[in-house]
Image (cartoon, grey):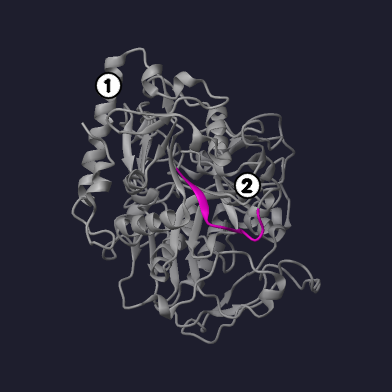
Amino acid sequence: MASTGNGNVSGVTPKASGVTAGRNGLPKISTHKKQSEICHDDSSAPVKAQTIDELHSLQRKKSAPTTPMDGVQGAFANFTEEERHRQQLQSISASLASLTRETGPSLVKGDPARGPVTPRVQHAPDHYVAPTFSASDSSLKSTHVLYNLSPAELYEQAIKYEQGSFITSTGALATLSGAKTGRAPKDKRVVRDDVTEDELWWGKCIRPTPEELESFGTPDFTIYNAGKFPCNRYTHYMTSSTSIDLNLGRREMVILGTQYAGEMKKGLFGVMHYLMPKRQILSLHSGCNMGKDGDVALFFGLSGTGKTTLSTDHNRYLIGDDEHCWSDKGVSNIEGGCYAKCIDLSREKEPDIWNAIKFGTVLENVVFDEHTREVDYLDKSVTENTRAAYPIEYIPNAKIPCVGPHPKNVILLACDAFGVLPPVSKLSLAQTMYHFISGYTALVAGTEEGVKEPRATFSACFGAAFIMLHPTKYAAMLATKMEKHGATGWLVNTGWSGGSYGSGSRMKLAYTRKIIDAIHSGKLLSANYKKTEVFGLEIPTEIEGVPSEILDPVNTWSDKKAYNDTLLKLGGLFKNNFEVFVNHKIGKDDKLTEEILAAGPNF
């Protein structure tokens, strides 16, 4: 995550006054009024705090008294809010002073708050190396830019300039994302122009080596992240105080009004979704791992379905947990790290992720003990969307470089809160396309205001917020690659069994892992299968280590009528969602085939 300071990223939000009734009895903070430093988009659920100080009080749990910090100087000094705001505003004003940017600002190396420093060791992995910039329209102002900082230097900047930054007991840096604890897809915009992929060169977002940095040249893409510094609500098309704007022609992204780190990550992912298919490379919102025999599996799934958890398997090599490309040569990771959900994280359930949370890892919106700095991963006081960002090499069995051969298995994950989808189904190619285009999961009661029962959520290609072409374009590419390389499709339900959310129970992770193991080993290909009603899914009758009675969800419901009613309800939701794709052209014959339509619910 980016820290702020002289010439870095985050900005200052004007104070707002005036509040209206909000969630849980707390006042809702409006963007067009002023009070309490938080800039909030009323279209999303507000955080459980009215002010920055209240947000910080949620972050730190009271325990034994701590040593007073009065009078501490240097990087760990406690700045007054007035001084902190003055420095941040001065920094942002310098960075965003010009109306246009041709080639970049005038740069001054290093932190202006520091005095002379000892020359750096040449072989250090992170050091000051200037990208190639020339004079620009902003050269009247001298902007301090810190680049290629080491994790330790980034820690210092965060603690110095970002209120709410702390070092936890494991050495990870804990931060807050402010009022926005998730992405704001409704506030994302792409500039329309005549740019084509031939005018740009794009590579993977992998950290360059010291040798590569020596001749790195001009960056291919620049992100201006102003943190909570808001956009101008009176600008045309602005819908809130948040704006994420992508300009492919200028190779720039500007982020205003949000400190949520996922905006940078997914912003560049959207760029890849535009450029890669034009080169006949399929961009994928998926996890990916590889067995010791070279068998590769892709894991598609929306947030909360287990994509990161299941792709991070200590018995297999991790290629990546979220963003990949599938070319004629195989699969490759787009990123150089992971951005894992860590709510309810435990050493027993997810040892690799647990052990990756150490120095160099950034924790977002977690709650920790005020004295010991031990993180409580069960605490949802700030948000349920707590995150851990760490380099991929922190996973012991990560495959470096992050590339692999063509996948053998394509696993579609759904957290079915209705409790009617089987724990695992083997899919035909047409069924794989249908469920890939649908991109189903479900929200459960309590996650959003007003949600009283499970609510189906469909996100085309398991990433509608990131894709830039029509979903059927990606589906056709996936079908072609699966057919060419003999990959098998699977639908795995990591959600509820024995009833819907509120009456049934969440599928045990241990059972899901046994199912995934059977897919990897190839044992499920030779299992006996039977077909379900309505969805027409092929389900195995037996899997080693998994109770046979749960493999067919009807067996786990005591109220069979309620099961049938819920099954028909979910089938109807699938049909209604798919209506928008019925008449769209797909494949060589330029139409959505009847085979794919027939692969959906039938009743």
Q: Does any portion of residue 27 appear in the rendered image?
A: yes
Q: Give the side of residue 186 with respect to residue 112, left or right.
A: left
Q: Badge 1 local density, few (<14 within 10 Å), some, or many (20+)?
A: some
User: For the point 29% across and 56% down, which residue is it?
Assistant: 239
Tag 2, which secondary structure?
loop
Indicate whether 153 appears above or below 184.
below
Residue at the (27%, 47%) spot, across then down: 596
Q: Which residue lies at the image location 69% right of the left edge and 78% below the top edge?
A: 214
Against 244, is 173 above or below? above
Depth check: 438 or 500 in front? Answer: 438
Tag 1, which secondary structure?
A: helix
**Residue 564 marker:** 1
Please provide the residue range marked out in magenta. 399-411
Q: Which mark is residue 291?
A: 2
Which quarter of the figure is the C terminus placed in?
top left
Q: Residue furthest left?
A: 583
Q: Most extreme residue toward the bottom, as rendered?
A: 135
Q: Is residue 406 magenta?
A: yes
Q: CA distance from mark 1 to mark 2?
A: 39 Å
| Amino acid type shown at disc 2 | Gly
Q: Are marks 1 and 2 in contact (CB under 8 Å)?
A: no
Q: Position of residue 428 (x, y in %)?
A: 37, 43
Asked whether 252 or 505 is in front, the reply is 505
